[in-house]
Image (cartoon, helix red, strand yellow):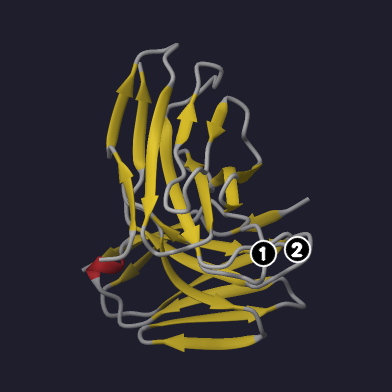
């Protein structure tokens, strides 16, 4: 079957760095997406990885290891507005996104 | 401004009534999707459409229906057959269907409450 595993909740301090891990099992693989979702709002696209390695985009970076079925999202210089849920979504062989329940990130001053 | 619009933002209906949720996009995207989100769960795909006048069932299509008469529009009807319709409904679109891993962009969502 297809499965996504992310921590349910994480807490971090403003200005710090946090890493949100995601492990996945899918039928085929066509890359992995990360989305941010603030409470009560729609998800917004953060990053896409299809090859192994690190993709950096400002304060956010995303890493992928296809052989390990593993990805992480790294958030640097945390700001209060980064308090949100972060959704890991690999794409299967049918180009369908498989969604995890997300990781709720709480930022404390 | 290009984007995806969903209306209304909040919707209340009595049990047993059908209700139609609107989704419109002016991004010229080929593919459109409907998802349902429940607390503590991942998004679940209801229906998707890769081209006008064609659509496919997702994982939880029972109790729902869609149409795709225009490229810009993909309305979702929640029928009285849907056993637990109260949820947050999200519409998304992507540029080119089935030819690669295209990013899906979401509308603001409609929160449906069935009383």
Which mark is in front, 2 or 1?
A: 1
Chain to which the residue tagged by mark 2 belongs:
A
Q: Quadrant of residue B64?
A: top right
**Could you tell whether B39 is left or right of A21 in the image?**
left
- Asked if the residue under mark 1 is in contact with the one under mark 2, i.e. CB atoms within 8 Å, the reply is no
Which class describes the residues within 10 Å of circle 1: few (<14), some (14-19), or many (20+)? few
Chain to which the residue tagged by mark 1 belongs:
B
Which class describes the residues within 10 Å of circle 2: few (<14), some (14-19), or many (20+)? some
The residue lying at 44 percent from left, 19 percent from top is: B18
Q: Nearer the viewer, residue A20 or B93?
A: B93
Return the residue found at the far left. Answer: A109
Residue B48 spot, x, y in % from top left? 58, 47
Disc marking residue A67: none
Q: Nearer the viewer, residue B81 or B51?
A: B51
When the figure is inspected, residue A13 is found, relative to residue B14, above or below; the finding is: below
When the figure is inspected, residue A51 is found, relative to residue A22, above or below; the finding is: below
**Label 2 sits on residue:** A93
Q: How many marks?
A: 2
The residue lying at 57 percent from left, 59 percent from top is: A6
Kind of element beneath mark 1: loop
Which corner quadrant holds the C terminus of chain A? bottom left
Q: Nearer the viewer, residue B14 or A9?
A: B14
Residue B22 spot, x, y in % from top left? 37, 39
CA–CA distance in space, label 2 to label 1: 10 Å
Residue B58 spot, x, y in % from top left? 64, 42
Residue B77 spot, x, y in % from top left? 47, 29
Disc marking residue B98: 1
Kind of element beneath mark 2: loop
Q: Are marks 2 and 1 on the same chain?
A: no
Q: Nearer the viewer, residue A62 or B9?
A: B9
């Amino acid at each position: 079957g297809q499965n996504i595993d992310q921590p349910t909740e994480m807490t971090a301090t403003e200005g710090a760095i946090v890493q949100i891990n995601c492990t996945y099992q899918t039928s085929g693989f066509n890359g992995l997406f990360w989305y941010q979702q603030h409470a009560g709002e729609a998800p917004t696209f953060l990053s896409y990885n299809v090859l192994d390695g690190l993709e950096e985009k400002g304060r956010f970076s995303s890493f992928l290891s296809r052989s390990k079925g593993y990805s992480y999202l790294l958030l640097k210089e945390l700001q209060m507005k980064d308090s949100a849920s972060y959704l890991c979504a690999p794409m299967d062989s049918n180009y369908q996104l498989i969604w995890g329940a997300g990781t709720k990130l709480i930022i404390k001053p | 401004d290009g984007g995806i619009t969903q209306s209304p933002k909040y919707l209340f209906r009595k049990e047993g009534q059908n209700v139609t949720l609107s989704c419109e996009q002016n991004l010229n995207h080929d593919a459109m999707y409907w998802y349902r989100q429940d607390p503590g769960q991942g998004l679940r795909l209801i229906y998707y459409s890769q081209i006008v006048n064609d659509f496919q069932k997702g994982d939880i299509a029972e109790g729902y229906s869609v149409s795709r008469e225009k490229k810009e529009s993909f309305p979702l009807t929640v029928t009285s057959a849907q056993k637990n319709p109260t949820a947050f409904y999200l519409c998304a679109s992507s540029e080119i269907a089935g030819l690669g891993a295209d990013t899906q962009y979401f509308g603001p969502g409609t929160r449906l409450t069935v009383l």
